[in-house]
Image (cartoon, rainbow, N blue to C red):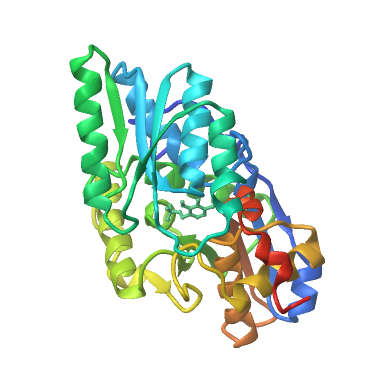
Amino acid sequence: MLTKNFQRVELAHTPTPLEFLDNLSAELNGPRIWVKRDDCTGLAMGGNKARQLEFYLGDAVAKGADTILTTGAVQSNHLRMTIAAARKLGLEVEVQLEERVPDRKPEYYDSGNPFLMRLMGAKISHYPVGEDEEGADDALHRRADEIRKAGGNPYVIPLSKNHRPFGSLGYVKCAEELLLQFQQESLQIDGIVLATGSAATQAGLLTGLRAMGSDIPVYGFCVRRDQAAQAERVFNTAQRVSKMIGHEGVVVSSDVWVDDRMLHPGYGRLNERLLAAIRLTARCEGLLLDPTYSGKSMAGLIHLVTNGHFTRDQTVVFLHTGGTPALFGYPEILQSKLD
Ligand SMILES: Cc1ncc(COP(=O)(O)O)c(C=O)c1O
């Protein structure tokens, strides 16, 4: 096991199912499409963050932390699941909501993830800027100092890119799980498609696959920043996590595939291709995507398929990273022109 030297707490329901999407595959008339159901990791409605949190909280518990601090968007799945994890482990938790998405409806602030955050009773603060990762982390560290002065032992899960990427270890571990499932199902996989934001998932998966000797391409669809910036972030994170697991240099820059064509008009904002992807997947498969992450990566997969990037005799895996509670923060999904 590549991650055996790291502290971990069990939070995620794993292995998550690997399922064939026969209706969607037939509808798109392209490759066979399978889905890795990381929307089913448990922990207050699931998602990719459960695997990442296993290692952050493993580190936090090992250090005797009593309070977890982290930051994210108002509809952040990471915050929802961090709160759930802290509650499960009996820890205090404080989250900081950033204003990242302009022109939102009241449901964005009241329903979906922020509703669940309040339900689980986290202490919530606000940070007025959405694109200031260092500033947001600094605010967490200032709050951590206050907690320390009051005799507590805080643990910060940072957002900015220059920290030890414990979260990526969750996807190194997932790579091992996937390769075993491919073997059990006798599958030859030609690509894995996912949403890429902080880069922890893509960097971890890529590192895990390469460290296990697999050259399966990982297609990351950008949800947060343009592809030049994202490629650099994925590569740098992969270098750090490769080093952590003792496989330095296992990921090379040509391994990093990212595409920002589905990002428009920006993080957490809707576009027609995303809406079409959410609708098609719901109607073909009863499979629910989200407007910020998995909807955009599915739009990307559909784009690759309809443009002939994959042939009919190939097999691809859509990594469903979760996020479905955010559907309830975007009532206009049902009012789009597509109906
Ligand atoms: C549902 C969902 N999918 C994908 C991502 C992106 O994953 P990562 O931040 O590891 O790149 C996130 C991150 O917040 C997410 O919440």
Instruction: Give above or below for 252 relative to 308.
Output: above
Q: Residue at x 30, y 58 (%)?
A: 250
Q: Quadrant of residue 126?
A: top left
Q: Is residue 189 visible?
A: no
Instruction: Give above or below for 279 relative to 99.
Output: below
Q: Nearer the viewer, residue 312 or 107?
A: 107
Q: Residue at x 35, y 17 (%)?
A: 66
Which x, y percent locates residue 81?
Answer: 51, 37
Which x, y percent locates residue 240?
Answer: 25, 50
Q: Nearer the viewer, residue 146 or 17?
A: 146
Q: Nearer the viewer, residue 248 or 281?
A: 281
Q: Is residue 122 left or right of residue 61?
A: right
Q: Is residue 5 left or right of residue 270?
A: left
Q: Residue at x 30, y 27 (%)?
A: 155
Which x, y percent locates residue 130?
Answer: 34, 56
Q: Is residue 134 visible?
A: yes
Q: Is residue 142 left or right of residue 250?
A: left
Which x, y percent locates residue 183?
Answer: 62, 53
Task: Tell me the quarter of the image containing the C terminus.
Answer: bottom right
How many marks on residues?
A: 0
Task: Tell me the quarter of the image containing the N terminus.
Answer: top left
Q: Residue at x 52, y 38 (%)?
A: 80
Instruction: Give above or below for 184 relative to 215.
Output: above
Residue at the far top in the pictured view:
151
